[in-house]
């Protein structure tokens, strides 16, 4: 079995590669990644010498490079994690999101059609459903919730989902889609809420909470997401969408307070800054379909997962220090330098 994992030098893709090489030591895993600001080869350090692993630096939008890789590897499965993934960046520069997230998905699926494939899996997000009100805790996203996006990021992901389903209907491409809630865990890029707050708190820097910090996200430990994708590519029904989430809703401010407490830092570091434009209020997944059909349940409780994650950042400065000292520093200055 050969699996091409795109975006495998990023947060979730790398964790998925570790999971697959461990659970299926006989599988060949080929990582295709452009190594944008969000992709780091250092993330893949521990698997780089595994004889069943290959890394290829390429852009999923580069048709020639993608086709060449398919000719070389003749993959059975493609799992597409490659994406521009940060909402705030999509508000600054939408176009690259359209390019990678939509056109890149089309190129990958064209390659699957041309060379044949057992499964194309699209890693999508709960953000395609838009948001839920804060005062209706009884509402959850199901697979039938209409797509109703808020940001250029979520719009590009929803567009890709529609394209994937159209390749199933029109060309009979054997596709599946997973729509997961917010992940957290090791190798999470430090522009996202949890690692940003951990790293800032360690340096006694302000913790920039958007608006009043009351927006709610449904957090899932990254390994649980990886297990869900593993189940879907092996046992999921072709043409189907599966929501993935662990019923773990938390407001941003509560998360930031947990981080302060764990690190022994004062809450006075918390700084309320101007809100994100179009900021989604609440995400909450109903994971009943994947539970009933595939037996998936989350294994890591948030209380354990967040402690494990914070410990990981404490023990892995070697990973994040070079990242925050480079180009990312310019981004941080631009986003937060004048944000009051
Ligand atoms: P990430 O930003 O950490 O990693 C993205 C990876 O894709 C990087 O390694 C980057 O170099 C690579 N990449 C970007 N553009 C590329 C291109 N044109 N060609 C090849 N590689 C390219 O993202 P992540 O958080 O790991 O998210 C992975 C996927 O999961 C995304 O599709 C995202 O929409 C989805 N998702 C993320 C979350 C979350 O909480 N992070 C939740 C649900 C779904
Ligand atoms: P983020 O990690 O960017 O994920 P997403 O927008 O995909 O859910 O943000 C999670 C939540 O944290 C979101 O409500 C925005 C908020 N947030 C802050 O309050 N401050 C920050 O500096 C960042 C990056 C996010």
Image: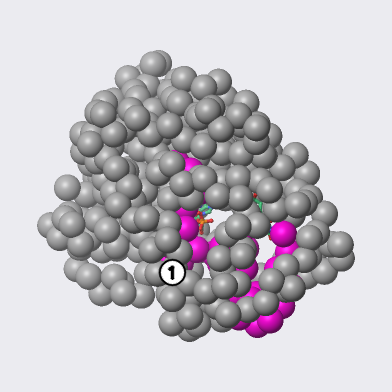
Q: Is residue 13 visible?
A: no
Q: Residue furthest top?
A: 170
- Percent position of residue 326, x then y: 64, 77
Residue at x 12% of width, y 57% of height: 26
- Percent position of residue 53, x then y: 26, 63
- Percent position of residue 255, x then y: 58, 59
Q: Is residue 183 magenta?
A: yes
> Considering only vertical position in the picture, is 320 above or below 16?
below
Using the rendered view, name the quadrant where residue 335 is placed. Answer: bottom right
Residue at x 56% of width, y 69% of height: 259
> Considering only vertical position in the picture, is 15 above or below 286?
below
Q: Quadrant of the C terminus?
A: bottom right
Residue, disc 1: 307
- In the image, 7: left or right of 69? right
Specify few, some or many for label 1: CA neighbours under 10 Å numbering under 14, 14-19, or 20 or more.
some
Q: How is the image coloured?
A: one colour
Using the rendered view, name the quadrant where residue 339 is placed. Answer: bottom right
Where does the magenta region start and end? 180-209
Q: Nearer the viewer, residue 58 or 268?
A: 268
């Amino acid at each position: 079995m050969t699996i091409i994992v795109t975006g495998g030098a990023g947060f979730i893709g790398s964790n998925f590669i570790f999971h697959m090489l461990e659970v299926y030591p006989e599988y060949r895993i080929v990582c295709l990644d452009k190594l944008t600001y969000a992709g780091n080869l250092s993330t893949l350090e521990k698997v780089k010498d595994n004889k069943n692993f290959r890394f290829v630096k390429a852009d999923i939008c580069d048709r020639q490079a993608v086709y060449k890789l398919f000719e070389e590897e003749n993959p059975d499965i493609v799992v597409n994690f490659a994406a521009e993934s940060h909402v705030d960046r999509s508000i600054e520069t939408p176009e690259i999101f359209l390019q990678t997230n939509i056109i890149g998905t089309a190129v990958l699926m064209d390659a699957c059609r041309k060379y044949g494939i057992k499964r194309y899996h699209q890693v999508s997000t709960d953000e395609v459903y838009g948001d839920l009100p804060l005062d209706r805790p009884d509402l959850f996203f199901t697979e039938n919730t209409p797509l109703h996006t808020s940001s250029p990021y979520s719009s590009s992901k929803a567009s890709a989902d529609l394209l994937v389903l159209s390749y199933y209907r029109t060309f009979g491409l054997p596709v599946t889609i997973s729509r997961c809630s917010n992940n957290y865990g090791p190798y999470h890029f430090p522009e996202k809420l949890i690692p940003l707050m951990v790293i800032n708190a360690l340096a006694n820097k302000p913790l920039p909470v958007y608006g009043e910090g009351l927006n709610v996200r449904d957090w899932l430990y990254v390994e649980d997401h990886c297990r869900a994708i593993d189940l879907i590519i092996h046992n999921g029904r072709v043409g189907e969408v599966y929501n993935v989430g662990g019923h773990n809703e938390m407001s941003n401010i509560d998360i930031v307070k947990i981080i302060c407490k764990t690190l022994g830092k004062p809450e006075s570091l918390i700084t309320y800054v101007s809100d994100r434009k179009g900021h989604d209020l609440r995400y909450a997944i109903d994971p009943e379909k994947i539970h009933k059909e595939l037996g998936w349940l989350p294994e890591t409780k948030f209380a354990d997962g967040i402690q494990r994650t914070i410990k990981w950042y404490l023990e892995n400065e070697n990973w994040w220090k070079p990242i925050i000292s480079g180009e990312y520093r310019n981004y941080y200055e631009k986003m937060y330098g004048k944000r009051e």
